[in-house]
Each structure stands twice: as C-alpha cells, then as structure tokens.
Amino acid sequence: MKKHNFSPGPCILPNEVMLKASEAVLDFNNSGLSLIEMSHRSKEFVDVMEKARSLALELLNLEGKGYKALFLQGGASTQFIMVALNLLEKRAGYLNTGTWSSKAIKEAKIYDDIYEVASSESANFNYIPKGYDIPSDYDYFHCTSNNTIFGTQMKKFPECPIPMVCDMSSDIFSRQLDFSKFDLIYAGAQKNMGPAGTTLVIVKEDILGKVSRKIPSMMDYKIHISKGSMFNTPPVFAVYTSMLTLEWLKNLGGIPVIEEINDKKARIMYSEIDINPLFKGYAVKEDRSMMNATFNLVNDNLKETFDTMLKEAGINGLNGHRSVGGYRASMYNALPIDSVKMLVEVMSELESKA
Amino acid sequence: MKKHNFSPGPCILPNEVMLKASEAVLDFNNSGLSLIEMSHRSKEFVDVMEKARSLALELLNLEGKGYKALFLQGGASTQFIMVALNLLEKRAGYLNTGTWSSKAIKEAKIYDDIYEVASSESANFNYIPKGYDIPSDYDYFHCTSNNTIFGTQMKKFPECPIPMVCDMSSDIFSRQLDFSKFDLIYAGAQKNMGPAGTTLVIVKEDILGKVSRKIPSMMDYKIHISKGSMFNTPPVFAVYTSMLTLEWLKNLGGIPVIEEINDKKARIMYSEIDINPLFKGYAVKEDRSMMNATFNLVNDNLKETFDTMLKEAGINGLNGHRSVGGYRASMYNALPIDSVKMLVEVMSELESKA
C-alpha cells in the first residue's frame, strides 16, 4: 500500500531523489566507489558541494548579491548559537512565535541581553504578532518564518533597519519571497531540502566580522566561507541528497512552480478543516502555515475511529505536537497533492460516518 | 575492475553495510518508508539510535562502567570546542602529536590557557613524545591516539592522574585497549565507523558538571545525555550506517578479531616499505600507525611510473597529505587484506622494473 507521509521532519523527499541517493551509496556516478567511501576532497565531491551551494543561491535568486551558501552540521539548534556568536555584540531583537524562536532566544541569552520585540506566547503561539518596532541601534533582528509546531507562518516580514536573520527551517524553498531582504537565512535540511544531517546557511558577507569576541573555528561563518564550506569533513550523504533535491526543484521550474502546488495543497487542506464540522483549525486564519496545518477534533471521542481510518488509508505522521495536541498535516514540497486529497477524503468520510 | 580504496577518510566501509544502507534509503525494514523520510522520534529510529549507542559501549567493553555514548554532529573539530567548554575551568594539558592535536589546542586556547605537556612538532611529528609529566592539578589531559596525516600512533598511554580525553577519530574500534582508562573519547565516524556526518562521544558521566561557565545547549554533553542523544534531529543516515558497521564488527568477533586482521595488514605493508629499497617510511618505527602507513619514494623520478601502476591496479586514495608528501596507505577496519597485498605487489613490481 502506498504511504502518505505527512511527517513533520525528517519528511518526505521526491521519489527520484531517494532512488538516486540510494544508488550513490552503492556506486557514485559509475566511479566504482560508494559516495560515502570517497574522499570529500575528491573532485567528484567538491563538485557536489559547489553545485549544492550555487543551486541554493540560484533558487533563492541571490546570485551575485554578496551572499554565500554554506552546508554546515548541527541543525538549526547550532545556528541559534552561531548567529549570536557571530553577530551579537550589544543587543539583538527577537520575535517570539513559538518553540523554536523561544529556543533561539534562550541560547542567544548566554552571550548577551536579548530583547523580545513581540511574542504570541500568551495565546500559545496561535498567531504571528504584527506592528512591533525594531530598534535601529540593535545588532540584528531574528525571526522564524514558519512555526512547524503551531502551524503559523509569517506572510509579511517587517521593514528592518538592521540585519534581518531568519530561521526558515520549515518553509525554505516553498514560496516566493524577496530573499535579499534577509541578511542571514538558516534552515535544517530535513523539511524541504534533504535528509537530517546538514543545515543550509545563506549569509550576506558584509554583516560578518563586526563582533569583538574570539569565535571558535567551527562556529565562525567567515572560516567556513573561506574554506568553501569544507573547513572539515562535511556530511557527504546529506549534502549530496540536498543537492539532488535542489536539482529536482530547479527542473520542476523552481520556487514559483512549487509555490503554486503548495498553495493548492494548502487550500484543499484548509477548506476541509473549515467546512467539516468535526474539525477546527488551531492557528488564526490569516497566519495559517502553508507547510503545516494544525487542527483538532471538536469531539475527542472520535479520535480512535479517525486514527484507525488514517492508518487504513496509509496516512503516516499526522500526530500533532504535544504542545498543541490533535493533528498536524505537514505538506512539504515533496508531498504529492494526492496525499492531501486522500487525507481530506478520510476527514470527510469521518463526517459522513459520525 | 575492483577498486582498492586506501582513502584516509571518508573511507572504505564493509560491503554489506553499504548494501544495507542503500536499501534503507529506499525502504527501511519493509516499513514502506525510506529511512531518511521517517520521524527521528519514531520507534524504528529510536531503536537504531539506542542500538548504536549500546553497541559502541559493548565493543569497547565499557558497559556498566558509568559511561554514556552519544552520536553528535560537527566532527572532531566541534569536539575540540566541546571538550574545552565542558571540562576546562583552570588549565588543561595537551600532548601535541600532529595537525589535529594542534587544532585541538588552538580551539581550547579560546577558553583558557593550555599547557603543551610535550610536542613532536620540531620533527614534523614523525614520532610520539614519551616520558612527559602530567600536572595532577590540571582539569584534564588531552591526546590524539592516531595521527592520520603523519602515520604515527600512541602504543602506550600515560598513567594519568587527571581525566584523560582522547581523540580516537582514526583508530577507534581497531585495537584492544583498556578503554576504561579514558574519561572521554571522541571520534568522527568517517574512518572505522561510518559515513561522515556523525561523531561518537563516549563520556564518563562523573567528570561532567564541574565548570562554572554557562554552556550552550548543543555544546553541553549533559543535555545530550539527558535527551538520549536526541536533543535535536540527529543525522539519521550517518547514525544508522554507523550502527550497521558496529553490528558488522560485533558479528566478526569484535575488536580482538579485527585487531589481528589489522595487525596482519600492517605487517605486510611495513615489511614491504622496509625491504623495498625504493621506499622509505616516514614515521619512526616504534610509533608506526596500524591504520595509516606513510612512506615516500627515495627517488622522486619514479613518481609518474608508480602512480600509473597504482592507477592500473585500481588503487585509490594513496596520495600523502601535503604536510608529509609521498604516499599514505590508510588501512582501516573494512579494507580487505587483498587490497594491501595488491599494493605491496605493485611496490615490488616497481622495484623489479627500476
């Protein structure tokens, strides 16, 4: 039976990517060697790294604009620290829109004071705060574009008088934005880009080198840039598979094309949530995420029936995060529209049964 | 043509490991899902992580002795920082035996003074210093068990009055040692354990929690321990493939068996270096590494001929590091004895030609 994989991350990747990744583990480009047993300094792998880096910039329309792309390790959680180490001298402003923003704030506080420009914590993060001020004498402003757990997404980004840093882990490459408004973007690979194990960092070079602290080499963006993202042995498999996914996206037509598909999936999903009386959405409508739809059963007595029906339909990964409960449909780039249709069918079948 | 893969790392892995890893990328344990698209919180993956952690302790004979095994990200280069952040309060002593020791010292110096207990730098690291003192009032002593670049290996470890920390990246799981003499062992996976992208840390819990600084979460061993090595999304593929390799080693008979094989490979290799007048070994004999044999041509005019012969024999990854020049035969656990025999054959063929 075909599985419909709604996992919040690690999550579904394009089928052709998994085929090629699997093949490369046996024999990389007919080299007679596995991708994972060859030197990362070999021409073959250096080409992979360079292609991944340039595809990332190309897809985001950031080529020739002073940005560098890095494939690092450690996840967004490590970026919480690196951002502060590399950019925080005096004070920074953070927008608190959920669990990951809160964690970013907590880690940055180790290095200095952090000012929360706004927070939706009192409403358990079911909306995105708007209309806040960003002090112009701060070092940078940090926000999280999409909140996987709560199912909210920033639709507009503030006019920012200081460098803008954005954790785009769960919606990068999913929609068109003017990415040149951001000075640093980071994203764990395991949603729209590849397997867990690498983190994309896109950084405008001119914001670096302005703090007075001594930064450990592995935490220093400037060092990674100077080494072409190969300061130490990179996570070869994760970088290669990310490159394949970016290539897939480019061949599909890039972000404009995938945005249309994502938009369609989200509209199908949310209209079912809105018309089906058995369910209610968690996030306020205007801030609903195109990537993660969070919703609850109005009557929890139906949970067992619904869960059984989901299982029978081959639907996987729909459990909501414990902070919200209920369900979460993660609809990343590689999720086929048919999977959303199947889920919606099961939801409406539940309605006809109930 | 069969390739003989002498790459210094990432390097050869057992064939059955690559087959299983490749298969898991398509379908993990007949789940209908790829290993890389399933949640790291799924029972399936949590089992993988727990198995990898317990196999590591079992193989090193460290079970029930107060140690925890962690699979982290960022390579040994990140451990240079984490060791200092977690253990360095006042002063630490480092043994400088090569490029990686020097890097470890450089990173730790960001946090405090470092004392080099001994160094072989003036001899371009062609031997392992002995007979040094380790001050008993220091926080810890740090050493590198095997020096990939220079081809030296510590055969004996000092009696250490303070916690002993060892970078075993390039010889862990290759030979029998009393591992309980160490308080913290770390090793990038990409030699004897798996693909690049994860780093094994074995730490004795009672040495932690003694420094006064605030440690960022991702850099804090205690936090990783408390979360079962799943504080954030782990590098799923690298951990799984490492688990497969540890399983392979256990089925083979564990470290005692692989040590015998490694010993045999090293004896074949070094006896050719010693009897063949065209070559000379780089490292002093008593400190020669069983993992990486470094050697040079006596007459560099033969380089082109030798390189062509190597290529024709399918021998890959034999270039020496630029700090030493010449050749380096990396003979990690998974390298078949036949590959060493083939290399030795080519070397002796060169002698008969010359």
Image: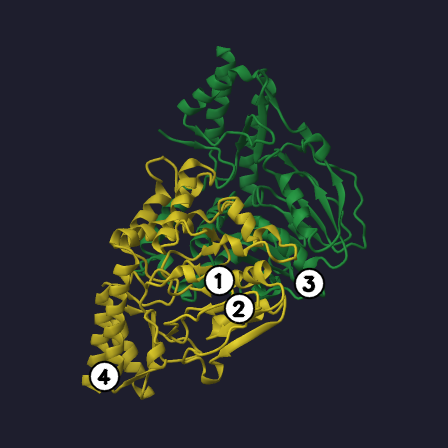
Chain colours: A green, B yellow
Residue under numbered circle 3: A206
Callout 2 secondary element: helix
Residue under numbered circle 2: B104
Callout 3 secondary element: helix
Q: Nearer the viewer, mark 3 or mark 4?
A: 4
Relative height, residue B116 to residue A117 (above, below) = below
Where is the C terminus of chain B found, in terms of image quarters? bottom left
Q: Nearer the viewer, mark 2 or mark 3?
A: 2
Q: Mark 2 belongs to which amino acid? A: Ala
Q: CA distance from mark 1 to mark 3?
A: 29 Å
Q: In terms of depth relative to the viewer, which is nearer, B123 or A40?
A: B123
* Callouts 2 and 3 in the same chain: no
Percent of width and height locating residue A79:
60, 53
Q: Mark 4 belongs to which amino acid? A: Ile
Mark 4 touching mark 1, by CB under 8 A?
Answer: no
Image disc number at residue B275: 4
Q: CA distance from mark 4 to mark 1?
A: 36 Å
N-term mark: 2 or 4:
2
Would you say residue A189 is visible in this rendering? Answer: no
Q: Which chain does tag 2 point to?
A: B
Callout 1 secondary element: helix
Q: Mark 3 belongs to which amino acid? A: Asp
Q: Which chain does tag 4 point to?
A: B
Relative height, residue A240 to residue B276 (above, below) = above
Q: CA distance from mark 2 to mark 4?
A: 36 Å
